[in-house]
Amino acid sequence: MPTTYFLYARKSTDVEDKQVRSIEDQLAVLRALAKQEGLQIAKEFIEKQSAKLPGRPVFNEMLARIERGEAQGILCWKLDRLARNMQDGGTIIEWLLQSTIRHIRTYERGYYPTDNVLLMCVEFGIANQYSLDLSTNTKRGLREKAKRGEYPSLAPVGYINDPRTKSVIIDRKKAEVIKAAFALYAEGNSRLEDMSVFFAKHKFLSKEGNAYHRDRITRILSNPFYCGLFRYAGEVYEGNYTPIVSKQLFGKVQGVLRKKGRPHHRQKNVPKAFCGLLKCDECGMMITAEVQKGHTYYRCTKKGGVHCSQPYVREETLDAQLSATLQEFVMPQEWATELSKLAEKDERETLQSAAVLTQETRAEIQTISQKLQRLLDAYLEQDIEQETYRSEKASLLSRKKSLKENMADLESGSIAWLEPLRGWIKDASMLDAIAESDDLPSKKSSFQKIFGSNLSIRNREIVFSPIPPYASLREARKNFPETGLCTFLVPPAGIEPTSFP
Ligand SMILES: [Zn+2]
C-alpha cells in the first residue's frame, strides 16, 4: 500500500516562531517537494497556534485521522512545526517507532521508524523544555537527593551507579576485595605499598594497567563512603546504600593511617587534579600545577623553547569553567531513556535476525556436507574424473569455510556496537552530577572522555573541541536555547533550516 501524506504547516506569533517561514512559503515549498518526489497528499492542515503546549485543535484532528489510517506520512517544513512539547513530540516519535506513521518528510530530510530518537527529540525542541527544567531543578534536585541519602555523584570503586534508578548499588566482587583490604590494613602490619600489591593481586589497577599509587590507596582507605557516609557540597550525609565496612572497622583504619603519618585525605585537597589534562594553547606544552600558599595553580611548563606569555590560573577558576562546560554535554534524562529503549529494541532485532541467519547458514553448511559426501560417492563409483572431483571438492570446502567464518562473526560481532553506545549514554547522563560535585578526578576523567586530548587553555580560558558523539549532543542542546533567549542568540538572517551533524 503506498503511503499517503498529510501536509502540516504551522506558524504562530510567538517569539520562537519569529524566524520561521510564513505559512504561504511553507505550503509553496512543501507542495513543490511533494510533486518532485511523487508524494500523494490527502489533505493540508494549517495551524496558527504555538506548539509549546499540547492541545492544538488542527494538530489533534490530524493525529486522529492518522490513527484512523487516512494517512501514513506527514509532510512539514521542520519537525518543530509538529511539536514543541514532550507530549506531542512523544506521540509522534512513538507512532513513528510503531510504524503508525511510516515517514515524515521535512524540507531537509526524511524520518523513518528506524531513526535515531535523540535527533528527533532535539528537532522537536524538547531539548528546549528540558534545559529550562534542568537549570532550575538540577541543583535543588541533587541536594534533595543527598538529603534522602542518595549519592548524587559518581560512586567510588566497589559500587556501581545504576543509571536507571539513579542509585548506588554494590559491585559484589569488588566490594569483597575492598572489605578484605580494610580488614588487612586495620591489623597495622601493612604498608601502603603492600596494599597496592594486595589490590593489584585482585586486579584493581589504574586505567593504564599499573598498580594503584599509594595516594589512591589512602583515598580508598579514608573514604567514609565505604562505611555509609558521603560528603556532598561541604556536608556529610548518611547514604541509603549498603555500606561495605562497618564504622568500627573504618575508624580503626583511620587510626592506623594517622599512626603511619598519612594525613586524612580529602579528595578536594588532592593537589594537581587536572595535571595532564590540558595543553597550553599558545605554545602547545603541557599544563602543570603547583601549590602556593594553600592554593593550587596551573601553568604552562614552557618547555617548548619558544617564548610563552601565558599566565597562571587558579584551580578554583579552572574548576568553575570546566564544570560549566561539562553541563553543556549532559544528556537529558528523557533522551537517555529513549536512546536506551531504542538500543534495546535494536539489540532484540539484531539478535533475532542473527539467529535466523545463523540457522540458514547452518542449514547451508549441512547441505554442503551432503554434497561433499555425494561427490565422494560419485568419485568412488568412478562416475566422475579425479580432476573434476578435486576441483568440485575444493570449491565446496572453500564455501563451507567462509560460511563458518560468517557464523562466528554473526555470533560475536552482531551487537558489539551496543556496549559503547550504552556506555556513552550512561557517561553523558551522569555528567550533571559530576559537574555539580567536588570530585575533581571524576571531572578530569569526564573531560578526557569528551575531548580526548583536544583541550587547551589560553588567557585563563579553556579552548576545546569535543569528539563526535559529544559534539553532536552539545550541538543538539545548543540549537534549542531557552525560549526567551532566542531573539538574542539567533541572528535575524537565519531562516534557512540548520542541519545537525
Ligand atoms: Zn605555553
Image: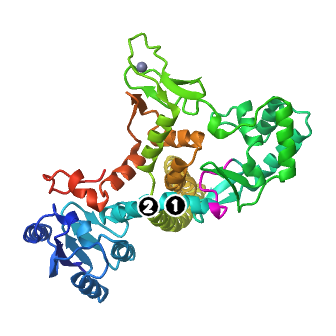
Instruction: Tell whether position 407 is magenta.
Output: no
Disc tally is 2
Q: Disc 1 on helix, strand or loop? A: helix
Q: Tell me, yes or no, if residue 369 can be seen here.
A: no
Q: Main secondary structure of the magenta part?
A: loop
Q: Which residue is at the front of the view, 134 or 456?
A: 134
Residue 501 as seen in the image, left or right of residue 175: left
Res 140 label: 1
Q: Which residue position holds label 2? A: 136
Residue 27 as seen in the image, left or right of residue 347: left
- Residue visible at 28% across and 83% down? 63
Q: Amino acid at mark 2?
A: Thr
Q: Distance between the Cα atoms at labels 1 and 2?
A: 7 Å
* Position above or below: 32 against 232: below
Magenta residues span 147-156
Q: Disc 2 on helix, strand or loop? A: helix
Using a 10 Å C-alpha cutoff, classify the residue at mark 1 as few (fewer than 14 neighbours), some (14 to 19) or many (20 or more): few
Q: Amino acid at mark 1?
A: Arg
Quadrant (top left/top right/bottom left/bottom right) for the N terminus: bottom left
In x, y percent, where is residue 234? 62, 48
Residue 349 as seen in the image, left or right of residue 119: right
Q: Which residue is at the front of the view, 489 or 372?
A: 489
Residue most extreme to the top: 305
Q: Quadrant of ligand 1?
A: top left
Res 461 label: none
In x, y percent, where is residue 325? 42, 44
Evaluate if marks 1 and 2 touch, with contact meaning CB atoms under 8 Å apart: yes
In x, y percent, where is residue 347? 51, 64
Q: Is mark 1 within 8 Å of ligand 1?
A: no
In x, y percent, where is residue 6? 20, 79
